[in-house]
Amino acid sequence: MSYIHPKLKLLASSPRTTCFALCAAALLLAGGCAGRPEAPILQLSSGSAAAAISSRLNAVLPADVLLLGEQHDAKEHQQIEQQVIADLAGRGLLAAVALEMADTRLSTAALKPSATEQQTRDALKWNDKGWKWEAYGPAVMTAVRAGVPVLGANLPRTELQASMADSTLDVLLPGPALKTQQQSIRIGHCNMLPESQIAPMTRIQIAKDVTMANTLSQAALPGKVVVLLTGSGHADRLLGVPLHLRADLTTKSVLLRAVNAHGDGPKAAFDSIWPTPAVPEVDYCAGLKDQLAPAVKPKPAGAMTPN
């Protein structure tokens, strides 16, 4: 395997840094991909928030698997996710909730509906530095209180390095999709990633998609819905998790999209787009540049190089 700078290893294992960048890249790319169908945009219905969510859900159901592709820093998206879970649980349709925010093989299945938040966090080995519990806790606890298992679905950090070296992952995407995903990685890292790392970082993305798909496939139950909470890039039907799901599962993918997200509606492979309020714009490329700067900062003239 080629050399990977420690700074880039850190970025590869940082869920929020990588996911913010990749989700932004997926939306940017989606607008310029010819032939990608335009998803219907469902505005909020009149009435209460609960009625609006029910209306939106009715438009995408039935489904065995429902992917909610969020923007991780949009609090309205996590609120919608909680409402979706509450609605499906109330109808008796919720089979399980799967999370990008926790590693696969972690689960609340052994917990009682009366479990505390701390017991739930412990069961999922929740990483609050990567994913704020205050954002995702309400959705998770809604499922727990309903007696519905919450499942970690993401690739464990301990498997990231092996995935980067696994060239067999390259063939899991059709050629054009692989190139699109690789370009997503470039843009997602603000064109600062060495070209030698594009393929390894793309493999991580594919491995995450495969891992999430396996979790969903195993959790599926006849007549019920497994919900995945994930970033928008993973929810893309032409690039992400849906490509790796069991063929017999009916899958619906919803993009939760802030109205100020990269101009006009993206021509991405989603079954529906749910518009949400604008979110403050953040220059994640500037933050990434600051993180990478020490790795590439030139030594002062005359500086000694340690032995």
Image: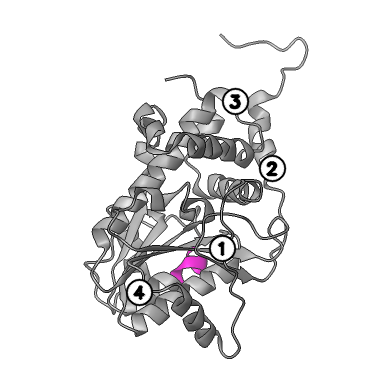
Label 1 vs 4, first from the N-terminus:
1
Q: CA distance from mark 2 to mark 4?
A: 35 Å
Residue designated by label 1:
39
Residue at point 39% right, 77% down? Answer: 142
Marks 4 and 1: in contact by CB < 8 Å? no
Q: CA distance from mark 4 to mark 3?
A: 42 Å
Q: Is residue 145 above or below residue 13?
A: below
For the residue pair 57 and 282, the one nearer the viewer reads as 57
> Which image quadrant for residue 1?
top left
Three-letter amino acid code of the residue under disc 3: Pro
Residue at point 70% right, 55% down? Answer: 262
- The image shows residue 53 at horizontal and vertical percentages of 50, 80
Q: Visible in this render: residue 103?
A: no
Q: Secondary structure at mark 4?
A: helix
Q: Is residue 182 above or below residue 226?
A: above
Q: Secondary structure at mark 2?
A: helix
Residue designated by label 3:
194
Describe residue 169's horizontal placement relative to residue 223 as left or right.
Answer: right
- The image shows residue 149 at horizontal and vertical percentages of 28, 68
Tag shown at residue 211: none
- Which-is-in-front pick, marks 1 and 4? 1
Q: Secondary structure at mark 1?
A: loop
